[in-house]
Image: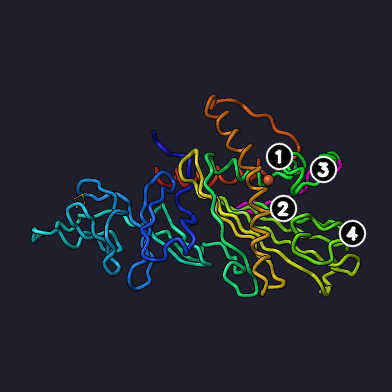
């Protein structure tokens, strides 16, 4: 089955958290329907190659790391970080083109970023800027979940506030009542996604926040700035300021607590997804139980999403041509899908022209 038109190839995707590569691990992971092996070489360099030896297709993830190179442990062919075969045991001459495909990789913000498209277009400056992920002013526990669903169903879910009251009634949502009172939010359209800013003044702190603070009954002014970016990156900056002290006018109110939430959806296949996330906080950094508590709260909510999203995927699988009908709350996800489809189309046209 061809994957043409399904994935945006010329884009940086998260392949792994860097902690997944410790102790010489050869990480076998399928990304955009290509099996790759990712490892850290002896020099510290991160390497990503097709996880298939060009000789007899043994997985290189079963191979042996030698310096920055990897040796296939079937007949011993050795490949450098560029994928070029540099040794064939028992054979003097190595055909110059012999090798496997290598993928540009960058380690940034504790993440391993991979470029599955044209290598010459892989500009590290295109990686999304999100310093809190690797800044000691922020704490969090990196998380990973595997979804049996297309990545855009997860993107849809995160773009849609209307599900909070029903899917997360007892975790994030509070009550079903909330769904009837809140209106769809206006989105700011960006070239590479959208941005939403919302304020809730004089609100009660949400349950996951209450679990990690002492002053649970104090009202807060709550600000969320969310961004959803191509190819599937969700960034949410949350501020909880003591209520009524001018946070909305930019006053730095003492006692303000902040969160930074980053989620990266990387297609494994067209119907499964690698989901990387971290929920960082900027207060009481010496207390590790805060990260742990937030991790549990968020995971609880993600499991609620996962149940409904994976069920949705099964319904799509049974009838892929089913036409969906939109409601007002779908503006953000509709725009995102349109913007991504436009980029994929442009990539296809450029490839055809070449
Ligand atoms: S399959 Fe890798 S060396 Fe033969
Ligand atoms: Fe959700």
> For mark 3, what is the residue?
175
Instruction: Report the mark closest to the observer, 3 or 1.
Output: 3
x then y, percent, for residue 132:
62, 68
| 340 or 240, nearer to the observer | 240
- Neighbours of disc 2 within 10 Å: few (<14), some (14-19), many (20+): few
Which range is magenta? 181-193
Instruction: Report the mark closest to the observer, 4 or 2.
Output: 4
Principal SS element in the magenta part?
loop
> For mark 1, what is the residue?
330
Q: For the residue labelled by badge 4, is the local secondary structure a helix, a strand or a loop? A: strand
Q: For the residue labelled by badge 2, is the local secondary structure a helix, a strand or a loop? A: strand
> For mark 2, what is the residue?
188
* Mark closer to the chain start, 2 or 3: 3
* Mark closer to the chain start, 4 or 2: 2
Instruction: Tell me which residue sits at (54%, 54%) in the image.
Output: 144
The relative height of residue 99 versus residue 307 in the rendered view (above or below) is below
Q: Quadrant of residue 104?
A: bottom left
- Neighbours of disc 1 within 10 Å: few (<14), some (14-19), many (20+): some
Image position of 213 (left or right of 12): right
* Mark closer to the chain start, 3 or 1: 3
> For mark 4, what is the residue?
202
């Amino acid at each position: 089955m061809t994957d043409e038109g399904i994935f945006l190839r010329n884009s940086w995707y998260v392949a792994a958290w860097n902690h997944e590569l410790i102790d010489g691990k050869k990480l076998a992971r399928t990304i955009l329907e290509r099996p790759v092996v990712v490892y850290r070489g002896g020099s510290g360099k991160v390497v990503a190659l097709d996880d298939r030896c060009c000789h007899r297709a043994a997985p290189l993830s079963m191979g042996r790391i030698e310096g920055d190179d990897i040796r296939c442990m079937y007949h011993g062919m050795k490949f450098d970080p560029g994928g070029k075969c540099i040794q064939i045991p028992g054979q003097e001459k190595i055909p110059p083109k012999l090798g496997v495909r290598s993928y540009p990789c960058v380690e940034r913000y504790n993440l391993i970023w991979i470029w599955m498209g044209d290598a010459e277009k892989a500009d590290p400056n295109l990686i999304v800027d999100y310093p809190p992920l690797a800044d000691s002013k922020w704490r969090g526990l990196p998380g990973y979940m595997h979804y049996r669903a297309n990545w855009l169903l997860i993107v849809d879910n995160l773009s849609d506030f209307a599900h909070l009251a029903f899917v997360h009634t007892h975790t994030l949502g509070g009550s079903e009542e909330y769904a009837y009172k809140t209106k769809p939010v206006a989105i700011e359209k960006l070239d590479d996604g959208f941005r939403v800013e919302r304020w809730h003044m004089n609100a009660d702190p949400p349950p996951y926040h209450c679990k990690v603070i002492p002053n649970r009954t104090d009202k807060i002014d709550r600000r969320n700035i969310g961004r959803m970016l191509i190819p599937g990156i969700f960034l949410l900056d949350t501020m909880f300021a003591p209520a009524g002290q001018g946070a909305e006018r930019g006053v730095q109110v003492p006692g303000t607590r902040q969160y930074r939430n980053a989620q990266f959806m990387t297609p494994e296949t067209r119907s499964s997804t690698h989901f990387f996330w971290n929920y960082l906080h900027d207060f009481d950094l010496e207390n590790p139980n805060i990260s742990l508590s937030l991790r549990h709260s968020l995971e609880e909510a993600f499991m609620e999403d996962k149940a409904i999203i994976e069920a949705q995927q099964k319904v799509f699988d049974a009838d892929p041509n089913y036409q969906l009908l939109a409601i007002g709350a779908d503006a953000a996800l509709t725009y995102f899908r349109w913007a991504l489809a436009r980029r994929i189309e442009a990539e296809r046209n450029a490839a055809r022209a070449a």
